[in-house]
Amino acid sequence: MEKLYFFNTLSRSKEAFKPLRPPMVGLYTCGPTVYNDQHIGNFRTAIFQDTLKRVLRLSGYQVRHVMNVTDVGHLTSDADEGEDKIEVGAAREGMTAWEIAEHFTQRYLKDLAKLNIIAPDVLCRATGHIPEQIELARRLEAKGLTYRIEDGVYFDTSKFPGYGRLDPSRLEGLKPGARVEMMAGKKNPTDFALWKFSPKDKKRQMEWPSPWGVGFPGWHLECSAMAMHYLGESFDIHCGGADLITIHHTNEIAQAEGATGKQFVRFWMHGEFLVMNQAKMAKSAGGFVTVRVLEEKGVDPLAYRYYCTTAHYRKQLDFTWEALEAAQSALNRLRDRAQALFQESRNSPGGVEETALVQKRFVERLEDDLDIPGAVAALWETLKAGAISPKAQYLFLEACDAVLGLDLLKSSQDQLPEEIRRLVEEREDARLRRDFKTADEIRLRLAAKGFVLEDFASGVRWKKRQEKESRP
């Protein structure tokens, strides 16, 4: 690749990407709060982040990817009030807080695999890094950036110049009476909890001793502490959903830079919402769609991944079952094309040189702030044009799928079951001998097993019959 350009939320502009310590790229992504299943809107962000990682690797970079799991400290209110979401979920499910966190962590990892999302190099749990979080809060206290009130230790945002610069336009939403209410004792509406004290009238399931008293870390503290622990005090890229810009990521910057005096992150990249019925999909709204729901309705999870390619990661994507059905059909067509190209390419000339010629436009779209819709359009145009040999098209499809992560080649000839491969070969031999009775009998046997044959001058092609998708 010539040069990558990414939209940096911090500067609100596209910038040429250059890592701080090439060829290594430090990448931190905000992971799940594990009190419930993650919905497909959450996974839209995860797919964008996975695509970013794949593009960085394609560019020759070595990516160290760190992702957190929030298993404590995420309260039900942005105003640092309410119950811990983990404890609420534990009561709902009849589990301990530790059990529910592990249960939904494992469910999340399984869903990542179904969506062909590459696992992070480091998966770090907030509960596994309490000492690091306490140490970060102590550093902030030593610099005079904190104060203590009845329910915890708070960061004083008035003492951190430039607070909110990640998105100044949204600071209006942090004033009293707007999104975040003022709590008794807070000096400023934007101040946030570093350490919360356990309630005096009951014992929490998750609590730890600290220099300030028994309690638990605030939600924002974990990401700053763990990101710096694994990637250093300054690193390259921090990703998350657009809903994290105003509060969570803004507070991460204040904590990290307040403690170190250094720029925390070079590039901030955010994925926009998946909307359903003109509203952001959210667990708090109820009725959200999970990967499990997709499977129950006969939808391949990778069809949802393809669906996410239809809109740029910085644009909202409107979810409908009809659009998802169209994505399933498009994915099936790509897989059928890959299977046909595999069979045609066995005796086809051409290859690497031809592939390099057509790959340029696909790569150019990737270089321009991950324009995946444009890259997919370039892929389809190349396949429809037929200007290069079947082998070159197959190699091109293989190269594209390394970025798209759609498992386009999983139906290729080399993955045919041995019994089916033998029957296909026997039928082709019978057809060449003009023994059409035997050929037709074998065709019917294959059809009964779910494999459809198509005869062409260049030879026979097969494809797996797709069951009709179901939806509400």
Image: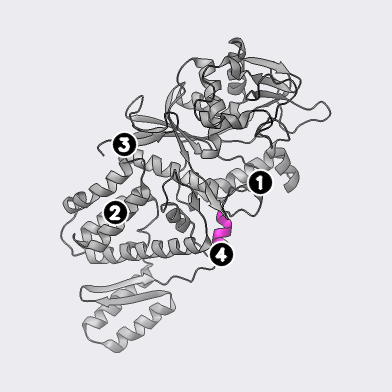
Above/below status of 145 relative to 391: above
Work out how far the residue at label 3 is from the one at label 4, CA to CA, in angstroms. Answer: 39 Å
Residue type, mark 4 in image: Lys
The mark closer to the camera, 2 or 4, is: 2
Work out how far the residue at label 2 is from the one at label 3, CA to CA, in angstroms. Answer: 18 Å
- Residue stretch in magenta: 291-295
The residue indicated by pointer 2 is 378
Q: Residue at x 25, y 87 (%)?
A: 435
Q: Is residue 244 left or right of residue 369?
A: right
Q: Is residue 181 left or right of residue 264?
A: right
Contact? badges 2 and 3 (CB < 8 Å): no
- Of 39 and 407, nearer the camera is 39
Residue 396 x, y percent position in the rendering: 26, 54
The local crowd at label 1, few if under 14, some if 14 to 19, many if 20 or more residues have their Cα within 10 Å, is few
State the mark number for residue 297.
4
- Of 462 and 277, nearer the camera is 277
Q: Secondary structure at mark 1?
A: helix
The residue indicated by pointer 1 is 284
Q: Secondary structure at mark 2?
A: helix
State the mark number for residue 4.
3
